Amino acid sequence: MRTHADRRSLWLCNRSLFRAMQLKNEATMVLNPVISKLSGKLVVLASASPRRLEILRNAGLRFEVVPSWFKETLDKRLFKSPQEYAVETAKQKALEVARRMPFKHLKTPDIVIGADTIVTVDGLILEKPVDKDDAYRMLSRLSGKEHSVFTGVAIVLCHEKENEEIDYQLIDFYEETKVKFADLSEDMLWEYINSGEPMDKAGGYGIQALGGMLVEFVHGDFLNVVGFPLNHFCKQLDLIYNRSESEVGESSRTLVNSLSKHTDKREIQGSNHTLPTMTSRGQLIEFNVTEHEDSEPKKEDLQQIIQLMDGFKASKALFTASKMGVFDLLQRKPGLDAAQVAQEIKAAVKGTEGLLGACVSLGLLQTSQRPVYKNTDLATRYLWSDSPFSLHGYIQHCNETLWPLFSHLESAVREGTNQHERAFGKKANDLFQDTYYNNQSVKLRFMNAMHSIAKVTGKAVATAFDLSSYKTACDLGGCTGAIAYELTKAHPEMSVTVFDLPEVVEMSEHFHPSHTDNRVSFVAGDFFKDELPKADLYILARILHDWPDEKVHILLKKIGDACTPGCGVLLSEILLNEDRSGPSRGLLQALSMSDGKQRSAAEYSTLLKSHGFITAEIRHTDNLLDAMLCVKE
């Protein structure tokens, strides 16, 4: 039976969804006549916000996503009002992308859209909370009060001229929505905070999701609170494209600045030159246009290139020190000199001195004047093999498997195939046989690698979403059970079955915690061939990116067939940016040319949707893996 709070929350969510649909329909009616004018134009959203992306896509706008590199470090004290801060931040985001694209992406956008949403109460701007206590302070401040949500929006129009210069024109505006919170009890506050939802939201709540239960009323544009004032934006586009010049007015046609396509990129990265621009409200403002007059290489540019060139050397130094047991040795016996370390690891003193020095320069070791060496906190946490978050196993895998593969990268790129045969003298399938069946040491090394990653990422994945409605879970290909144990820690009512190949299950006991949790069990089987264990929630952590599409569809169909409506899939992978501009970890991993591929959140959503799952939430964890929660329709 639903409680009064449940019914009220459901009513609020339904009311919010109805209002969102109503606003979307109104905005789309305005936007429809503009669509034909935008046909063939390169429209760019200078934001990685999945909420803004969804709002604009739902309105039928076609665009690319190029997240802005502008660091949101403007001094709020310099602005007379919160909305001015939001507008200026949106402008800087849009202008940075508009100026970067001709040089970095070698194409000039027609329109760049920037936006910044802030929550204000009592004149104070509330940022995203840094931790649960911060979220509690924010939500307590909002409890029982009316507050304002401002979104500043900037539209930059780019025009290429015959002399290959580019004109930039700027239109900006803001939208304000009033939101009133109910009086929140301590239990409700902490229940919401513990769901994890507040942590990546301005003001600490998301009105379109669980945060809707905190809200008594919304006065104004609902989608503005979600993250983008679609209705106001569409009206601005209508003014730009469907009205006469006299209706639009001079203000929106004022040049921000004009740059040549051949202008050195350094000329737009730091300057004392100030150029005027006019807003759509007719206010004359000034801002800096970045420029350098010298022709010397920029120090930071050189440093970035040198780091990339030397990156392989740093990796091999890390791999070698780890393989030779340097970090384990210095954890046991801190304060050894180079000769003592050389004796312990059975290496030449000269070579050991060089390796230790390199590790000091990389921040992995620290030394004193004698000199003697000891681990830094970084090495103790991640490189000492007995650390709870040790990546020692994965580093071994990188050294023994990935390093040889990537030494044949040129051949991989030219042929578009993996290089297992060149690197190991065996085809990929034969190597897989060794890993799982024939070679015990190779199998143990691979399981150590997977265990390392799972230990570091497990908590972030397990706590990414509120999973309290799921009582049974099945971790497909869960290997050593590291994520399964984190799930049972985070969700005390949940039991988890780890389903993996018999050879993996047989050796998994070597990795179990000392106090085994009886809510975690292991079942042997092949998820492509055998019947899947029944569960409310299926975990796919670092699984789908490894397999070709036909195998992925086989697995997802089996999960879909095993699920009833309301069952979930927790997917954990490196989620690529929608424009595939990053993160570099995912794109570099793809260079191994495995049979699988790396995907963006939207691509995974489409994949899951084809098997009856709707994406409920996406979480970029700032850990090694991101997470998505999808629910069976």
Image: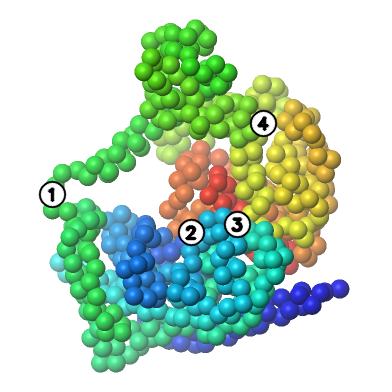
Q: Name the residue carrying label 3.
A: 132
**Circles 2, 3 touching at the beta carbon (< 8 Å):** no
User: Which of pointers 2 and 1 lies earlier in the amino acid sequence?
Assistant: 1
User: Which of pointers 3 and 1 lies earlier in the amino acid sequence?
Assistant: 3
Q: Name the residue carrying label 1.
A: 294
User: Which residue sits furthest right?
Assistant: 1
Return the mark for residue 447.
Answer: 4
Front residue (pair 425, 166):
166
Q: Name the residue carrying label 2.
A: 578
- Residue drawn 45% across the image and 51% down it: 582
User: Which of pointers 2 and 3 lies earlier in the amino acid sequence?
Assistant: 3
User: Which of pointers 4 and 2 lies earlier in the amino acid sequence?
Assistant: 4
Quarter location, residue 317: top left
Residue type, label 4:
Met
Q: State the SS at label 3.
A: helix
Within 10 Å of disc 1 (Cα), the crowding (few <14, some 14-19, many 20+) is few
**Circles 3, 1 touching at the beta carbon (< 8 Å):** no
Total marks in image? 4
Q: Give coordinates of residue 38: x percent, y percent.
A: 38, 77
Within 10 Å of disc 3 (Cα), the crowding (few <14, some 14-19, many 20+) is some
